[in-house]
């Protein structure tokens, strides 16, 4: 069954490498989502040596090639993936991407008859968190008063 989300951030080939083994040969219960930016504000070229041929390659090209290679390797194993590309790295584009994911969470919850925005387990941790923060604020205020 392919539902539910566990967001895991992976940037570049070092992070990708640490997850690829699980994605490639672990349980077939994941949809891997690749997110890329088409027009990066800055791009760095690095020296690349591939099978005796050396040359400068933009980092954006390396990251894109790594993503495409990962997608192809997953597909060769019958594993699901998708690629989401945003044109620029701006607050507008990041906001649109976040909105897209908010909607997917709502739809996935509805398909499983789960209210994704009212989870009792989440409420338990939030109660503990808010009480901890409240206690901290009260103690700081008391300390500030005693110092005056």
Image: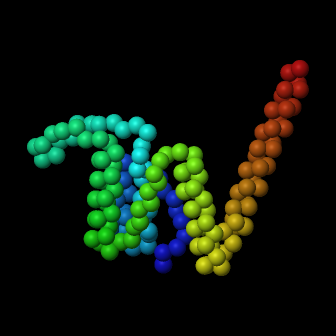
Residue 17 visible, this angle? no
Q: Nearer the viewer, residue 108 or 58?
A: 58
Above or below residue 113? Residue 144 is: above
Above or below residue 108? Residue 41 is: above
Q: Nearer the viewer, residue 69 or 94?
A: 94
In what quadrant of the picture does the C terminus appear? top right
Locate residue 37, reporting x and y percent.
43, 50
**In screen coordinates, is 3 left or right of 112?**
left
Locate residue 120, reporting x and y percent.
72, 67
Residue found at the very far top of the displayed protein: 148
The residue sitting at 32% across, 67% down in the picture is 74
The residue sitting at 48% across, 56% down in the picture is 8
Locate residue 118, reporting x and y percent.
72, 67
Q: Total label count?
A: 0
**In screen coordinates, is 87 left or right of 18?**
right
The residue sitting at 74% across, 61% down in the picture is 123
Q: Nearer the viewer, residue 143 or 48?
A: 48
**In screen coordinates, is 35 left or right of 66?**
right
């Amino acid at each position: 069954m392919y539902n539910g989300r566990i967001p895991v951030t992976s940037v570049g080939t070092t992070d990708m490498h640490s997850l690829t083994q699980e994605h490639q040969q672990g349980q077939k219960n994941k949809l891997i989502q690749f997110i890329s930016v088409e027009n990066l504000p800055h791009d760095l070229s690095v020296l690349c040596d591939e099978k005796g041929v050396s040359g400068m390659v933009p980092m954006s090209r390396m990251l894109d090639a790594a993503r495409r290679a990962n997608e192809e390797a997953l597909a060769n194993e019958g594993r699901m993936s998708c690629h989401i590309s945003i044109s620029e790295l701006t607050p507008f584009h990041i906001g649109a991407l976040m909105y897209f994911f908010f909607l997917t969470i709502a739809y996935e919850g509805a398909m499983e008859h789960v209210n994704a925005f009212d989870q009792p387990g989440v409420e338990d941790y939030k109660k503990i968190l808010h009480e901890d923060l409240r206690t901290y604020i009260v103690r700081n205020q008391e300390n500030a008063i005693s110092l005056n």
